[in-house]
Image (cartoon, rainbow, N blue to C red):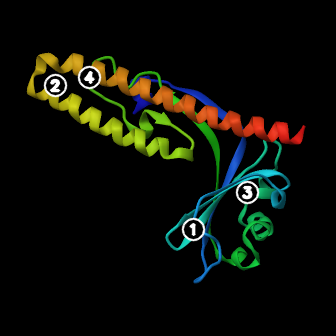
C-alpha cells in the first residue's frame, strides 16, 4: 500500500540480528513464570538474552552481533546446541519454532496519502522492535484514531480534510516518539554491554 502511494518508510535497521526461539515448557517445568532479561549471558558468550513466558512454554530472544554467522546461532540445529546452556538440557528437544529478525525502527513519511482518502495504521505505518509492545499498542491507538477521523469525515464532509490531517500528524508524532523510545532502550543495552566489556 505504501509503495502504491509512494510513501516512504524511514528509519534504521540494526546491524546485528536476533534469534527468536519458542520452546514448549515441560509439565511441571522449573523455570519461573516471569520475564527475565540477562545482559551478557555467559552461556551465549556474552550475548544478551530475553526470556518471556507464554501459555504452554516460553520464548527466548538472543541478541546476536553483526559478525555472528547465522549458522552458529540462528538455525534450529545451532539453537539445540546453545539453548541447553540457558534453560537446561531437557528443553533442546522441545523447540517449536526458530526465526531471525533485525531490530527495525521505521516510520512512514506520512500517515495519509495526499488526497486524504487512505490512512495508514499499524505496521503499514510503523515498524518497531518487539520490546515494550509498542507496535501493537500503537496500532490499536492508530485504528481508534483513524476510525474517529473517518467517522468525522463521513458525518460532516467539510470536517474531513482537517480530521484526516489531524490524524496523520498526531499518529505520526506518536510513532516517532515510540521509535525514539525504542532506540533509547537499544542504545542503553549497547552502552551497558560496552561498559561491562571495557
* Residue 181 versus residue 96 in the image, above or below: above
* Cβ–Cβ under 8 Å for marks 4 and 3: no
- First along the sequence among labels 2 and 3: 3
Q: Are marks 4 and 2 in contact (CB under 8 Å)?
A: yes
Mark toward the start of the polypeptide (3 vs 1): 1
Going 81% across and 58% down the picture, which residue do you hit? 44
Q: Which residue is labeled 2 in the image?
A: 153
**Which quadrant would residue 51 be assigned to in this image?**
bottom right
Residue assigned mark 4 = 164
- Expressed as whole percent of the image width and height from the top left, the position of residue 36 reads 65, 58
Residue placed furthest toward the right: 198
- Earlier in the chain: of badge 1 and badge 4, it is 1
For image coordinates 78% across by 64% down, the residue present is 78
Name which quarter of the figure residue 191 lies in.
top right
Contact between marks 3 and 1 (CB within 8 A): the answer is: no
Residue at 74% x, 65% y is 79
> Would residue 129 appear left or right of 138 to someone viewing this image?
right
User: Which residue carries the number 3 mark?
Assistant: 74
Crowd tier of the residue under label 4, counting other residues whose Cα lies within 10 Å: few below 14, some 14–19, many 20 or above: many
Q: Can residue 112 be seen in this snapshot? A: no
Res 70 label: none
Q: Disc 1 versus disc 2: distance between alpha carbons?
A: 47 Å
Q: What's the distance in space between the residues labelled 4 and 2, CA to CA? A: 8 Å
Gap between marks 3 and 1, in whole Å? Answer: 25 Å
The mark closer to the camera, 1 or 2, is 1
* CA distance separating discs 1 and 4: 43 Å
How far apart in space, not on screen, are marks 4 and 3 (Cα)? 43 Å
Say which mark, if any, is on residue 33: 1
Residue 18 visible to an observer of this rendering: yes
Amino acid at each position: 500500500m505504501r509503495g502504491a502511494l509512494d510513501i516512504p518508510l524511514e528509519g534504521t535497521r540494526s546491524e546485528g540480528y536476533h534469534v527468536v526461539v519458542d520452546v514448549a515448557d515441560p509439565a511441571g517445568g522449573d523455570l519461573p513464570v516471569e520475564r527475565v532479561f540477562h545482559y551478557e549471558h555467559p552461556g551465549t558468550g556474552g550475548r544478551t538474552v530475553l526470556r518471556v513466558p507464554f501459555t504452554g512454554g516460553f520464548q527466548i530472544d538472543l541478541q546476536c552481533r553483526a559478525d555472528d554467522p547465522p549458522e552458529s546461532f540462528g538455525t534450529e540445529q545451532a539453537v539445540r546446541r546453545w539453548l541447553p546452556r540457558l534453560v537446561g538440557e531437557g528443553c533442546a528437544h522441545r523447540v517449536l519454532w526458530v526465526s531471525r529478525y533485525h531490530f527495525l525502527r521505521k516510520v512512514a513519511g506520512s500517515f495519509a496519502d495526499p488526497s486524504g482518502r487512505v490512512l495508514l495504521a499499524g505496521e503499514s505505518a510503523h515498524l518497531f522492535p518487539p520490546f515494550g509492545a509498542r507496535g501493537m499498542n500503537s496500532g490499536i491507538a492508530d485504528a481508534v484514531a483513524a476510525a474517529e477521523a473517518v467517522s468525522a469525515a463521513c458525518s460532516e464532509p467539510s470536517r474531513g480534510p482537517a480530521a484526516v490531517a489531524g490524524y496523520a500528524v498526531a499518529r505520526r508524532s506518536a510513532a516517532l516518539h515510540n521509535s525514539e523510545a525504542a532506540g533509547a532502550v537499544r542504545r542503553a543495552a549497547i552502552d551497558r554491554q560496552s561498559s561491562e566489556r571495557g
